[in-house]
Image (cartoon, helix red, strand yellow):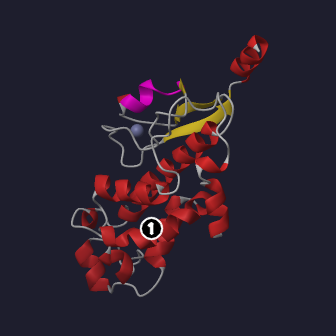
Amino acid sequence: MSDGFWKTLFRSNNEKSPSKAACSKKLTFDPKTIVSDAIDEAITELGLLEMAAKPNLEVLVKRCMREGFRAVATAHRKDGAQLDKSEKKELGIRANAFMSRQAASELTEKGMESPLKAHFLTLWRADFTIDRARHLLNASQQDFGRITVISGGHKGCTICETTSENTFDPCGVSPFPPKGCVNAGCNRMFISFVDYTAARKSKMKG
Ligand SMILES: [Zn+2]
């Protein structure tokens, strides 16, 4: 995916003149740094990967939308010189499981407890944050743009379950997983849409 494509998705809010009904407040995040911020949050909150993994994750996360984060994480573990049999055994993984020296070096002590999931979960968490941010930005740039929350298949997270199907103004809402969400990869999705009923009412008022 070219950088140009990525930039278009995260065009600065200022490049389009803000319209009166689009956003009552400011966005809670900076679209220019959200990719980096989402990765920081996922690394810090999950604690499975070292911060040194960030440059690799920045490249990998851009492929997630097209390839899926599970496939992208596996490809990263597969890419490059592999740990030998005894090193894999020490790490507690199957001899035929992929684990490159690079990927292994990115694991924290906590990450070493689930070495085959560490990259996958960190990418999942960051990718969903970026996707929510994309929808928030998109809605904020439209007249009467709104957000609907979908918590697809969420288990054990009351915050995510109770806000499912709620509708929000895109501004003032955080793209990050809610504090206290028990899931490593939070499944909360935001879908942007235009509230045509409100738009029509406003037009009638003149
Ligand atoms: Zn959640």
- x%, y% of residue 73? 47, 67
- x%, y% of residue 32? 52, 56
Return the residue found at the far top.
205
Is the residue 28 above or below the residue 169 in the image? Answer: below
Span shown in magenta: 159-166
Which amino acid type is shown beneath numbered disc 1?
Answer: Leu
When asked about the image quadrant of residue 93, the answer is: bottom left
Task: Left or right? Give the position of 176 relative to 72.
Answer: left
Residue at mark 1: 57
Q: Nearer the viewer, residue 71 or 151?
A: 151
Residue under the point 47% across and 78% down: 78
Residue under the point 73% across and 14% down: 201
Task: Left or right? Give the position of 103 relative to 173.
Answer: left
Q: Nearer the viewer, residue 95 or 120?
A: 120
Q: Is residue 205 visible?
A: yes
- x%, y% of residue 131? 55, 48
Is the residue 43 above or below the residue 60 in the image? Answer: above
Residue under the point 36% across and 33% down: 157
Residue under the point 34% across and 59% down: 43
**Ligand 1 lies under 8 Å from the Cβ of mark 1:** no
